[in-house]
Image (cartoon, grey):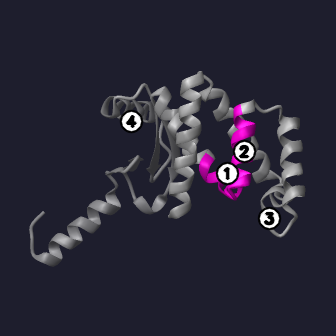
């Protein structure tokens, strides 16, 4: 839990700089590119993040990566600050928090849509339009998944809000009502 709070704090700090100098979207891309590179190259991540290796050598590896990726001065300084403060291992969480902040800045909401069966593109479009209207955002990016255990219907999660219209939940609710002796 602590590292999520730390990640948010660093992400907010970088976002403030990005808003101020108008480069928030560029920083988003650079942060995502580096995070993806480190996720795909475990040896690189170890060479930069593993405290068992010499700190000077790890910093030198980070310097080389920053130069090869031709990162902006702000992102480079940000990465070295993370390194110096012993927070470079939180880069993935910081990137995740920054991506969410950048989405908010652009008026984008992220949601997940879980259905029992594959949905038609028309149904997805209607759900997306409803979510846009409900949230007041300019765009809602949907992550669509299937879960046959829902039996039917859909479950939509957007932020902390869960809209559960699945048959599975309705059956469970009816069962609870019957146990309590209530009528449906």
The 10 Å Cα crowd at callout 3, few under 14, some 14 to 19, many 20 or more, is some
- Sequence-first disc among 4 and 1: 1
- Residue denoted by label 4: 127
- Residue denoted by label 3: 50
Q: Looking at the image, which is closer to me, 168 or 143?
A: 143
Callout 2 touching callout 3 (CB < 8 Å): no
* Image coordinates for residue 131, horizontal then vertical, percent: 36, 35
Residue extent of the magenta highlight: 74-94
- Residue denoted by label 2: 79
* Image coordinates for residue 126, horizontal then vertical, percent: 39, 31
Q: What residue is at 17 percent from the left and 78 percent from the top?
A: 179
Nearer the observer, disc 4 or disc 3? 3
Label 1 and label 2: CA atoms lie apart by: 9 Å
Compared to residue 153, the image places residue 15 above or below, namely above
Label 2 and label 3: CA atoms lie apart by: 15 Å
Nearer the observer, disc 4 or disc 2? 2
Label 1 and label 3: CA atoms lie apart by: 13 Å
What element does badge 1 sit on? helix
- Sequence-first disc among 2 and 3: 3
Callout 4 touching callout 3 (CB < 8 Å): no
Q: Is residue 79 visible?
A: yes
Label 4 and label 2: CA atoms lie apart by: 39 Å
């Amino acid at each position: 839990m602590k590292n999520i709070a730390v990640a948010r704090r660093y992400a907010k700090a970088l976002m403030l700089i990005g808003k101020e100098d108008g480069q928030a979207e560029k920083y988003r891309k650079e942060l995502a590119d580096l995070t993806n590179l480190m996720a795909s190259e475990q040896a690189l991540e170890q060479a930069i993040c593993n405290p068992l290796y010499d700190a000077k050598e790890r910093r030198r590896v980070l310097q080389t990566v920053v130069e090869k990726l031709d990162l902006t001065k702000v992102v480079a300084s940000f990465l070295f600050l993370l390194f110096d403060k012993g927070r470079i291992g939180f880069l993935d969480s910081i990137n995740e928090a920054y991506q969410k902040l950048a989405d908010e800045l652009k008026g984008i909401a992220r949601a997940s849509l879980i259905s029992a069966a594959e949905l038609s593109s028309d149904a997805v479009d209607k759900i997306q339009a409803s979510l846009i209207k409900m949230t007041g955002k300019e765009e809602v990016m949907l992550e669509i998944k299937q879960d046959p255990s829902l039996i039917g219907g859909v479950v939509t999660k957007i932020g902390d809000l869960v809209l559960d219209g699945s048959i599975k939940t309705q059956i469970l609710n009816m069962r609870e009502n019957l146990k309590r002796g209530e009528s449906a």
